[in-house]
Amino acid sequence: MNNLLLVPVLLPLVCGALLMMAARGSMAMVRLISISSILLLLLCSLYLLPLAAQGEILVYGLGNWSAPFGIVLLLDRLSALMLMVTAVLAVFVVLYASRGEDQRGSYFHALLQFQLAGINGAFLTGDLFNLFVFFEILLIASYALLLHGLGVARIRSALHYVILNLIGSGLFLIAAGLFYGVAGTLNMTDLALFVSQAEGDQLFLLEAAGALLMLVFGLKAAFFPLYFWLPRAYASATAPVAALFAIMTKVGLYAILRFSTLVFGAAAGGASGLGTGVLWVLALVTIVLAILGAFAANSLSSLLAYLVLVSVGTLLAGIAVGTEATLAASLYYLVQSTWVIAGLFLLAGIVAKQRGDLGDNFKVGPRLLNPNLLGACFFLATIAVAGLPPFAGFFGKVLLLQAVSGQTAWQLWTVVLVSGLVGVIGLSRAGSMLFWRHHTTASEAQPLDKVTFAVTALLLCSSPLLVVFAQPLVNFTQATALQVLDAASYLQAMQLKEAM
């Protein structure tokens, strides 16, 4: 067993507890501990990525207890990729927040660490119950992070967010109870084996539990009709928190992908492909409604929140089709959309500070102190996020469009291309309002912090870098798609673990 599989969960948990105790001490020490922990997390994820790339599925049983009695962690290409995406994002978020944003509320760094523990645990766990536990850890931390900086808007949006997610948690427990009552296990691999052999009433109950679970994951991923909480919540969060939340919807999509391929995949017999037809329709509707919301947004952060939903719909479309090519394209698109939208949230925070009380609202305000620098960053980032050449957003969408065929092709081509055009118009409107139109009234603008700008610019540079390294990344995502579609390899890895 490779004990390093524990590090992405244990390290932020331990550091989070340490930071809770050190919160009343020196802020410099708190930041040093938090940044060091996240850099170690990045190193660990960079070590695990090539390990997973060798193709072997690593299974770790805590306390050497085998499934279904013990807690099982599972590392494959998909979980390693998600760990790396999260760790890279966390590095930029913590560096940005450490320039003063972390002092707008209490326990920012501790909550950040707890949220990373929950996210990483969700990507690594191999059973349903612990997926629920890690979901709760990341959600509880996100409730408090959403309130970071306080304010009426944040409290109101946090209240909706908390209520909806508590309902989701209740439904999750009901679904898990159904699975356990019928199958006698919550281990995902054991569930996959049981579902493939189920018939009659057992199969009906398992499908009902699966549908309930997809509903819960849909709430986390925020696709239609379960997305209404997201725009207000993300738009009201502080810049580093909103940037970190860019990975939150991907946790729900990851869970859908894991369950739809492993438990309800091609080997699931009568339950094979559970709900994928519905997911396809919901994906297209999500893209259409999200881009309309982005077009009608009244602030940059609100517009970006709707762009998160556009990326959710696009990724869900690839998962719903479920072929090797669409999954590979979706994973490539996931990486770039997460990092670029997170970078745009950080940029929105910088722009808001230079517009005084107007923030990033689309109203004519005072001239920015650095309009050319910030405008250039915004222009390049919008090209990337809208999916125009030559950046990674364009390649991601092209890969996905090339991967579909038949009737689904013209549906996806139409929705993606039209939404891209509307998105460009909406982003152009935002850019002209924020960077070109201004009055001569003096503002209370804060001078540009060079470190926060450098951090933001570097994160936005991920888009051209993903073009430069497109071939190795596409090779990795293609191998990842092949692996997640091969449910037998997970069963074999689990049996090997139990035999040891």
Image: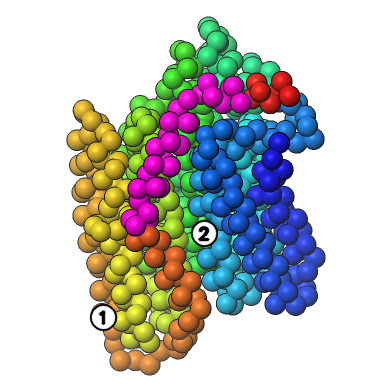
**Observer-nearest residue: 1 or 378?**
1
Residue 469 image offset from top left, x and y in percent:
37, 54
Q: Residues within 10 Å of mark 2 (few under 14, many from 20)?
A: many
Residue 128 falls left or right of residue 336: right
Q: Which residues are magenta?
A: 466-493
Above/below status of 465 relative to 257: below
Determine whether label 2 and label 1 are within 8 Å by CB. Answer: no
Residue occupying the far front of the picture: 54
Above/below status of 482 relative to 310: above
Q: Quadrant of residue 336?
A: bottom left
Residue 133 falls left or right of residue 370: right
Q: Which residue is mark 2?
A: 89
Q: Residue at x 26, y 33 (%)?
A: 404
Residue 62 image offset from top left, x and y in percent:
75, 36
Residue 209 image offset from top left, x and y in percent:
56, 24
Q: Residues within 10 Å of mark 1 (few under 14, many from 20)?
A: few
Q: Residue at x 59, y 38 (%)?
A: 75
Residue occupying the far top of the picture: 200
Q: Give the residue type at disc 1.
A: Arg
Magenta portion: prevailing SS class: helix
Q: Which residue is mark 1?
A: 437
Q: Residue at x 64, y 16 (%)?
A: 182
Q: In the rendered image, which quarter contains the C terminus?
A: top right
Cα separation between marks 2 and 1: 32 Å
Residue 109 lies in the magenta stretch: no
Q: Quadrant of residue 155?
A: bottom right
